[in-house]
Image (tube, rainbow, N blue to C red):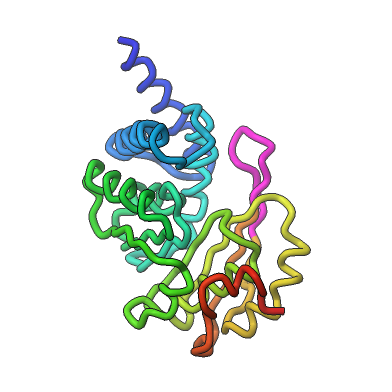
Amino acid sequence: MFIQAIMEEFSQKMKEQAKEIGILLEEKQINQFYQYMQLLLEWNQKINLTAITKPEEIILKHFIDSVTIAKYIEKNAKVVDVGTGAGFPGIPLKILREDIEITLLDSLNKRVSFLKEVIEQLSLSKIEAVHFRAEEFGKNPKYRENFDCATSRAVANLSTLSEYLIPLVKVKGICISMKGSEVEEEIEQSKKAISVLGGNIEAIDKFQLPFSDMDRNIIILRKVKNTPTKYPRKSGMPAKEPIK
């Protein structure tokens, strides 16, 4: 009975908050989110995956936050989630959108092992977790300029992040950067880097997470030309010396 009550409360919160952002969840999806949360909490005792451990906070700050970008992603798009960590936003997007193909990228092998376990336990298809640094991944001919969409949440400042994301998408593809509240200065400082890498700022969407005062900014970059072959630079350089 106790587990049933927890499950029902989880289900109600997920449906309520998803509906607030225009998403209607099916029972199968809610069950997958619940299973994902259980695996996250279980593995978090062994490896550091998240500081957020209360179910209501996981729902809002991880699951709902992740799926806020689903509306920008075209049907059947090929998506890469750079610096995915515990799988955000990639796994929630996959639960929501069976049509998209997702590559989860992380530089820590332990986290990649966790992601593979989640993929298997949730029986997710058209999704893989790979162990790479973003700079090496962007140089790899198998992945470079191969995605319709590249996304990332809370990984780096926009100049650095642009050097990770833009080389991965095809011309006309998009990069979705998920940011918190204060972005004006960061956007201003990143304009040169975005242009050099072949991108353009297409839109900035500001909103609050449902039933909260948490501000979010989604920055959409459109790739307008091929990225020069010298980018991304070698590991560590984009963070150490962002393009200015």
Location of residue 89 with respect to 82 vertically, above or below: above
What is the number of callouts on the image? 0
Q: Position of residue 83 (x, y in %)?
A: 47, 59
Magenta region: which residues?
A: 205-216
Query: Residue at the top extreme?
Result: 1
Q: Position of residue 2 (x, y in %)?
A: 34, 11
Residue at 53%, 83% in the rendered image: 231
Location of residue 68 with respect to 241 vertically, above or below: above
- The residue lying toward the viewer, choosing from 115 and 65, is 115
Residue 231 visible in image:
yes
- Would residue 82 be counted in the magenta stretch? no
Residue at 27%, 45% in the rendered image: 117
Q: In the picture provided, is 239 more to the left or to the right than 3?
A: right
The answer to which image quadrant residue 196 occupies is bottom right
The answer to which image quadrant residue 154 occupies is bottom right
- Would residue 207 be counted in the magenta stretch? yes
Location of residue 36 with respect to 128 vertically, above or below: above
Q: Position of residue 244 (x, y in %)?
A: 72, 79
Residue 30 visible in image:
no
Q: Position of residue 74 (x, y in %)?
A: 41, 66
Residue at 59%, 37% in the rendered image: 210
The N terminus is located in which quarter?
top left
